[in-house]
Amino acid sequence: MEELASGVASCRACPRLVAWREQVARERRAAYAAEEYWGRPVPGFGDPRARLLVVGLAPAAHGANRTGRMFTGDRSGDWLFRALFRAGFADRPESVRRDDGLRLRDCWVTAAVRCAPPDNTPTTVERETCRHWLVEEMALLDRVRVVVALGGIAWATVLGIVAASGLVLPRPRPRFGHGVRCEPAPLAGSRRPAPVLLASYHPSQQNTFTGRLTEEGLDSVFATARGIIGGLG
């Protein structure tokens, strides 16, 4: 995982994303003018023996692109880590900075794209270019039994990776929707069970401010994940 994190943090494969993330790190938001921004691709973090994998879209420009840790330092992270804490996957309900002492329990948090994109919208080419990092990460996280995808892009990315690994998805592929559940068929003869895939609205301000996603709605997804993991013993 350390080698993977080092590779992620040094990636410069997408010129548009490199230029944007570094511009944001130079110019900074006024509220964070005294801080040194991370300004690089952001690795995943958590428990390397996790049975729960949470996949978001990409680092926020003044969140993870500033702090250097996924979902750390922005309002989306506030929602996510409160929910993980309530479900028993985090030892505290907030994530403020990379060295704040937060520990995830049986959980790993990552994203489909590792650089902050302009307007929070990576291009299709950028998504495909970045996908191999998540492929490698999922291969290393060999105890994962549940994957929670936050948002439509994360959902599509996870489904694509799972299908490419040889696992059989239902046909037609399940469309994204909050609370959607997908159970791929395991590979014949494989000792590694297929993970259960759960979809959730992303805890972005666009979703939380409008009430599209409520704390109860987010809690329900992680309660389902906890129930599946608990049932595995």
Image (cartoon, rainbow, N blue to C red):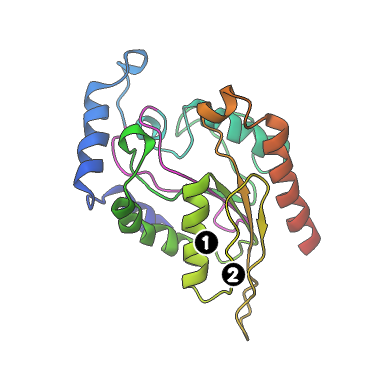
Locate residue 38: give its quadrant: top left
Q: Which sits in the foreground, 99 or 78? A: 78
Q: Which residues are magenta?
A: 38-62
**Is 172 situated above or below 7?**
below
Q: Which mark is residue 169?
A: 2
Whichever of callouts 1 and 2 sits on the residue coming sooner in the sequence is 1
**Is 29 situated above or below 199?**
above
Tag 1 residue: 159
Q: Quadrant of the C terminus?
A: bottom right
Q: Are the residues flagged by discs 1 and 2 in contact, CB closer than 8 Å? A: yes
One can see residue 7 in this view: no
Density class for disc 1 (Cα within 10 Å; few <14, some 14-19, many ≥20) is many
In the displayed structure image, the side of residue 33 where residue 102 appears, left or right: right
In the displayed structure image, the side of residue 195 where residue 43 appears, left or right: left
- State the predominant SS element of the stretch in magenta: loop
The percent position of residue 77, horizontal first and vertical second, equals: 53, 32
The percent position of residue 20, horizontal first and vertical second, equals: 24, 35
Type of the residue with mark 2: Leu
Locate residue 48: give its quadrant: bottom right
Q: Which residue does the image show at 58% across and 74% down from the upper left?
A: 168
Type of the residue with mark 1: Leu
Density class for disc 2 (Cα within 10 Å; few <14, some 14-19, many ≥20) is some
Q: Which mark is residue 18?
A: none
Q: CA distance from mark 1 to mark 2?
A: 8 Å
One can see residue 147 in this view: yes
